Amino acid sequence: MSETLENLLQETRQFPPPEALAANANVTAAAYDEAAADRLGFWEQQAKRLSWAKPWDEVLDWSNSPFAKWFVGGELNVAYNCLDRHLAEGRGDKVAIHWEGEPGDTRTITYADLHKSVCQASNALTNLGVQAGDRVAIYMPMIPEAAVAMLACARIGATHSVVFGGFSVDALSGRIQDASAKVVITADGGYRRGNPSALKPTVDEAVAQCPTIEHVLVVRRTGQEVSWTDKDVWWHEVVDAADPHHEAQPFDSEHPLFILYTSGTTAKPKGILHTTGGYLTQVSYTHHAVFDLKPDTDVYWCTADIGWVTGHSYIVYGPLSNGATQIMYEGTPDTPHKGRFWELVEKYKVTIIYTAPTLIRTMMKWGDDIPAKFDLSSLRLLGSVGEPINPEAWIWYRQNIGRGECPVVDTWWQTETGGIMISPLPGVTAAKPGSAMSPLPGISADVVDDTATSVPNGGGGYLVLREPWPSMLRTIWGDDERFIDTYWSRFEGMYFAGDGAKRDADGHIWLLGRVDDVMLVSGHNISTTEVESALVSHPSVAEAAVVGATDPTTGQAIVAFVILRGTVEGGDGLVKDLRNHVAKTLGPIAKPRQIMLVPELPKTRSGKIMRRLLRDVAENRSLGDVTTLQDSAVMDLISSGMQGSK
Ligand code: WT7
């Protein structure tokens, strides 16, 4: 991968921080120097953001690497840090969550309200026999009780395993079984695209295959008819009736806080284990640093679902530990209309929004006129996560959502890293569209070649992390061997992230997607991300997905699937244009063999393009497993609606 295309390093636009933001920023350039001078001392300083019942004896124990222990000997309670602490400091009446249901029902929840609910849920779970160390599965819609359930588990030391509410019976039962969970917390259903969507029947079927489950705690959200078993209890009967007083006990810094499964394309999902003190330290610090959160004036909104790590770290633990006021929204961005997100920004005067490239590209496709109808003047900072963001999508985001003024922070991290690792600092970094820029203070990310040597500026290779970090995964639940094989075996003594990356002439980092998605065309390594970005930089293109298909002459050939913007008409002329545009932008070697104009792209429920399926189409194979597709009708649309080719 060292041989990336020279002229790919061509994005030269750069956007320095607004002066007022820089002058008042939570974190300045000095943080990089402090961390470089004394990395462990730096993290020790950040751990002091939290309230510890017992101080640590040692910052990091790496003697049994890659099994890390952070803040060894320290004790704290995560829920205490997210709730009680704010009450003790007189912030009980501050709004923690402005919740908005998809049908438009709302709830305003203060820190005191949230504390009370979490105490009641803690007592209710204890009454159901849940003890510290037990596992609890959470399968919920985006309602406040989802956050309450997570915090109640944390409060009593039970390890939660949140399973995304869109997952199937098999996905849920597999995860329950892998963790031997004792209780499931769920709801009758949630609202999705204007209708109640049931959850309980999936849980019933899953639990029938899971003998370890003793109780199912059910929130009534939609009022749908549900069948009832002797394991089931209603949330409103046992939680609302429970004692609102609960004394939080401290737990060891390395006590297991949660397991979250990463899907993986074919293999068994990996139960990523996160623990207590290091995790909370890093998510609290990064939320403060990257979003420049001012708890007294900001209104923060992370649009992720609580079923993903983004929801764990940047809806629940990061923002609440920092005393933020935030928005939580139940539904989809197009219900009841395509301006719903911007309507919410206007209504709640949101100042910081954190969302995903897939969402931004969808908004581009829907058209500039939609956000233009709303007053977005409250916004001051925009974040992106989940995939590489194409430079054009970055610029669109800044122009159309951020008035051409708000800094955009492109944050690279993973379920495994627990918290943000590579990102601009909004008051420091002059950001380049499409680059995650630099490792945060205290993080040692690097780009290395096949022989584990750092690549020079202008080079490309594999993203690695050279030193342990506080919110790193501790293992794969029940499978230490697989933890070592997957992350620590590719390069001696380094964490292998599985992403390709390049370092530009200034040393800034550009993420190029999963290394499995790099194409080898006539001996050249070309990243799918770069060809996609070239396509999206054409004014007619809203979104693109690129795969390498086997080719008798070139080894692999580039095949692109393209969605056009709003009202653009397709045709052979345009396809030719697009191929030439890529050749002109990236060089003739990157010219796609074939471009297919399609109405939709197959995505996982977390918004990642399923290139495996597109490769099947490109190589004329019958489709593989489509069970994790968000909408299985998409593949029919693509196969039947394809126009254009060579
Ligand atoms: C993978 C991790 C981190 C929370 C959501 C995803 C890709 C994530 C970026 C970014 C380029 C990114 C990587 C990474 N990714 N953020 N800003 N730029 N790529 O968590 O499901 O564990 O996925 O998402 O490929 O390895 P995840």
Image (cartoon, rainbow, N blue to C red):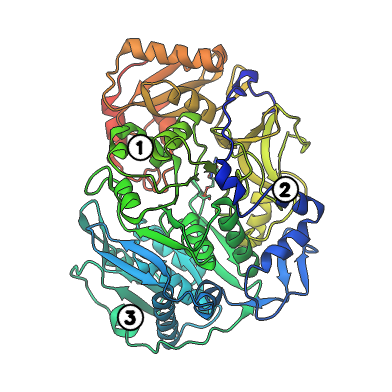
Q: What residue type is disc 2 on? A: Ser
Q: Earlier in the sequence, mark 1 or mark 3?
A: 3
Q: Quadrant of the C terminus?
A: top left
Q: Residue at x 35, y 63 (%)?
A: 98
| Residue identified by numbered label 3 | 231
**Which element is circle 3 on?**
loop
Provide residue 527's location: percent of width, then percent of height. 56, 28
- The answer to whether 88 appears left or right of 59 in the picture is left
- The answer to whether 530 appears left or right of 607 in the picture is right
User: Along the line of sight, which residue is nearer the eye, 20 or 450?
Assistant: 20
Q: Earlier in the sequence, mark 2 or mark 1?
A: 1
Q: Residue at x 64, y 67 (%)?
A: 49
Distance (Cα) linking label 2 and label 1: 33 Å
**Which element is circle 2 on?**
loop
Residue 626, quarter of the rendered image: top left
Provide residue 361's location: percent of width, then percent of height. 39, 35
User: Along the line of sight, which residue is nearer the eye, 34 or 626?
Assistant: 34
User: Along the line of sight, which residue is nearer the eye, 171 or 48?
Assistant: 48
| Residue identified by numbered label 1 | 362
Q: Residue at x 75, y 53 (%)?
A: 35
- The answer to whether 64 appears left or right of 147 in the picture is right
Provide residue 362's location: percent of width, then percent of height. 35, 37
Callout 1 crowding tier (Cα within 10 Å): few <14, some 14–19, many ≥20:
some
Residue 137, quarter of the rendered image: bottom left
- Is residue 601 visible in the rendered image? The answer is no
| Residue identified by numbered label 2 | 444
Q: What residue type is disc 3 on? A: Lys
Provide residue 91's location: percent of width, then percent of height. 48, 74
